[in-house]
């Protein structure tokens, strides 16, 4: 039991009873993470409990993050549907940027799957129809959710089903490239993996994966690394869920396969189109009926004629009943004889067949044990696999679900693990050449980031796999592209420095002053951070010269002690008085010597001793 609203989680909890904007009193923390926190709060104006989603304080000051956060408010506020989590308000309170959302008390579909693993077909259809009703409203408003997964399906204590967290949502007109996709990789459509744009069909694909998981208790693809899963989405076909659970109706098999078509244009165009498929599902009439007319004989599939009835020919109308029955009696005897012969032929004779069991994922020993009971032989072949661990079976020939004659031989393909190869050298290439080299070598372009570096502008200066250690073929390779060197600004005036930095996309942050013997007053001494990998749009802090702090010690010998002390202090020097005279005589007695002596070069802040002993 929990109060839940789908969120990315913050890092500085707000104290209980804090009132945001004088209206929302914080009651307790519900979820806490690095980017945002969610609290239960009391709306003092409407006297109702709400959920407050607060952007982390360290991100609230970042205008880019803040605008993305508030985009969720605008997206969600445009929707009003009983199967969507409602947004009530947004606001700013000091350092806190927040959204006010409907508080849904209950659990998530993810928690249900964790506890029960699978959901029966009737309940799965009911859940999906509710989700698609809400998602359909979003699609009609031109909004793509982009993060459909069980964690974002809320099941309230009142029996309501709600789709939450439009934090990743974008409008259809705003194309979303693959490198910007934040959704969970287990539900990622093939077009996103290969660099395409997110569309409403992308959400449909995620719904198909989620239905598969509800029916089978697992997602169709798995792997130790997210790249392995993404690679399977892009290069494999989602199997029928009935291959995992034979009790799953054929009609739901068809929906899963339709929703997860690799080519977006072949899927239902949006949530409403997918919902129409669910409305035509008949869970009560989905299985083929199997008959066994002769004990020990083969199973025969009954073929049912639709729309036709058998009528006796008019040639029999005047024939006595016994004569009418004679042909049917003869036919019956022939059928029984043929059935008996056929039963022998297909069960014990030359035509006997054995079903090929599902052996994928098993070891060679386990497969051998399963085949021995079926009087089947096997041979071993090896192949690389990015999804099946080394030593486990990837597939069989004939494939699982097919048939093979008694005593036949099945070829078992054992995984040698993913094919490991070295990433080709990409340093010094431009982005287009580096991408072509990667694709031609069987890799996928990963994240591309740009930062300042000693390498020439536009050249790759670092990439994953540059250590020359072999990595799985098909891996995602991240690139770092140079923006060129950070401008050298030491010695330039402050105005000239600002112009030089802005020209390459850097902004000026804090400006501090320091003394310098080599840089004229008012000119820049240095900038920080000055290390490499500084991204465009970053702020750099400047240190500006106050000029030198060296001075020549003036001659104050013969001056009154107090007067000499004031002269040196006004120059920024610290003064010690070495005398045996009482303070009352410092205004009438003179300085006899100084340490250091007059004319010595000293710095502001140094200590000078006045000697006045009598």
Image (cartoon, rainbow, N blue to C red):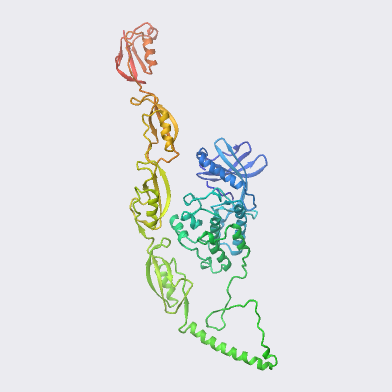
Q: Is residue 289 above or below residue 324?
A: above
Which residue ends up furthest to the top in the rendered image?
A: 588
Foreground: 246 or 316?
316
Q: Quadrant of residue 19?
A: top right
In depth, the one of 353 and 118 nearer the eye is 353
Left or right, residue 75 beside residue 551: right
Question: Residue at 48% across / 58% down in the picture?
Answer: 190
Give the residue drawn at x 46%, y 59%. 234
Whether residue 232 is visible:
yes
Residue found 66% across the figure and 91% down from its top: 324
Left or right: 3 in relation to 538: right
Pinpoint residue 140: horizontal percent, then vertical percent: 61, 53
Quadrant for the C terminus, please: top left
Answer with the quarter of the image where residue 472 lies: bottom left
Examine the rendered structure and indicate whether residue 141 appears above or below residue 494: below
Residue 117 showing in the rendered view:
no
State the residue in front, 478 or 289: 478
């Amino acid at each position: 039991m929990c109060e839940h609203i789908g969120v990315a989680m913050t890092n500085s909890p707000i104290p209980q009873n804090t009132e945001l904007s004088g209206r929302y009193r914080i009651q307790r923390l519900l979820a806490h993470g690095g980017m945002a926190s969610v609290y239960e709060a009391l709306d003092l104006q409407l006297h109702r409990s709400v959920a407050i989603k607060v952007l982390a304080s360290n991100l609230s000051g970042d205008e880019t993050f803040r605008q993305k956060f508030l985009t969720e408010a605008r997206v969600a506020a445009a929707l009003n549907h009983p199967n969507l989590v409602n947004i009530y308000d947004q606001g700013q309170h000091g350092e806190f940027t927040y959204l006010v959302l409907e508080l849904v008390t209950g659990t998530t579909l993810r928690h249900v799957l964790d506890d029960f693993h699978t959901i029966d077909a009737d309940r799965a259809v009911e859940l999906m129809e509710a989700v698609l009703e809400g998602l359909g409203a979003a699609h009609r408003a031109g909004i793509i959710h982009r993060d459909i997964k069980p964690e974002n399906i809320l099941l309230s204590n009142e029996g309501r089903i709600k789709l939450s967290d439009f934090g990743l949502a974008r409008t259809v007109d705003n194309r979303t490239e693959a490198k910007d996709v934040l959704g969970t990789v287990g539900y990622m459509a093939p077009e996103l993996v290969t660099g395409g744009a997110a569309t409403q069909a992308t959400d449909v694909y995620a719904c198909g994966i989620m239905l598969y998981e509800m029916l089978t208790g697992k997602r169709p693809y798995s792997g130790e690394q997210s790249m392995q899963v993404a690679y399977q989405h892009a290069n494999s076909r989602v199997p029928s869920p009935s291959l995992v659970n034979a009790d799953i109706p054929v009609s739901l098999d068809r929906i899963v396969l339709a929703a997860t078509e690799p080519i977006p244009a072949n899927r239902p165009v949006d949530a409403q189109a997918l919902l129409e498929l669910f409305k035509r599902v008949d869970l009560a009439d989905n299985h083929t009926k199997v008959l066994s007319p002769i004990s020990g004989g083969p199973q025969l599939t009954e073929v049912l004629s639709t729309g036709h009835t058998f009528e006796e020919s008019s040639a029999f109308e005047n024939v006595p009943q016994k004569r009418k029955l004679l042909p049917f009696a003869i036919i019956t005897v022939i059928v029984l004889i043929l059935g008996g012969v056929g039963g022998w032929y297909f069960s014990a004779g030359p035509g006997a067949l054995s079903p090929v069991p599902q052996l994928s994922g098993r070891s060679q020993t386990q497969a051998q044990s399963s085949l021995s009971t079926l009087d089947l032989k096997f041979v071993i072949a090896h192949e690389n696999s990015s999804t099946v661990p080394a030593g486990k079976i990837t597939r069989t020939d004939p494939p699982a679900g097919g048939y093979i004659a008694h005593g036949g031989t099945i070829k078992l393909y054992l995984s040698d693990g993913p094919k490991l190869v070295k990433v080709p050298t990409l340093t010094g290439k431009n982005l287009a050449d580096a991408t072509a080299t990667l694709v031609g070598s069987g890799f996928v372009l990963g994240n591309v980031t740009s930062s300042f570096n000693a390498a020439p502008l536009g050249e790759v200066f670092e990439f994953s796999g540059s250590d020359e250690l072999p990595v799985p073929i098909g891996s995602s390779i991240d690139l770092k592209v140079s923006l060129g060197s950070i401008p050298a600004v030491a010695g330039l005036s402050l105005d000239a420095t600002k112009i030089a930095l802005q020209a390459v996309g850097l902004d000026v942050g804090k400006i501090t002053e320091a003394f310098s013997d080599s840089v004229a007053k008012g000119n820049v001494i240095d900038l920080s951070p000055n290390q490499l990998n500084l991204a465009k749009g970053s702020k750099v802090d400047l240190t500006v010269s106050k000029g030198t702090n060296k001075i020549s010690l003036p001659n104050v010998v013969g001056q009154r002690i107090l007067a000499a002390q004031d002269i040196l202090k006004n120059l920024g020097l610290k003064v010690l008085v070495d005398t045996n005279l009482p303070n009352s005589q410092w205004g009438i007695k003179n300085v006899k010597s100084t340490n250091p002596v007059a004319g010595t070069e000293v710095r502001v802040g140094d200590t000078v001793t006045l000697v006045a002993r009598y």
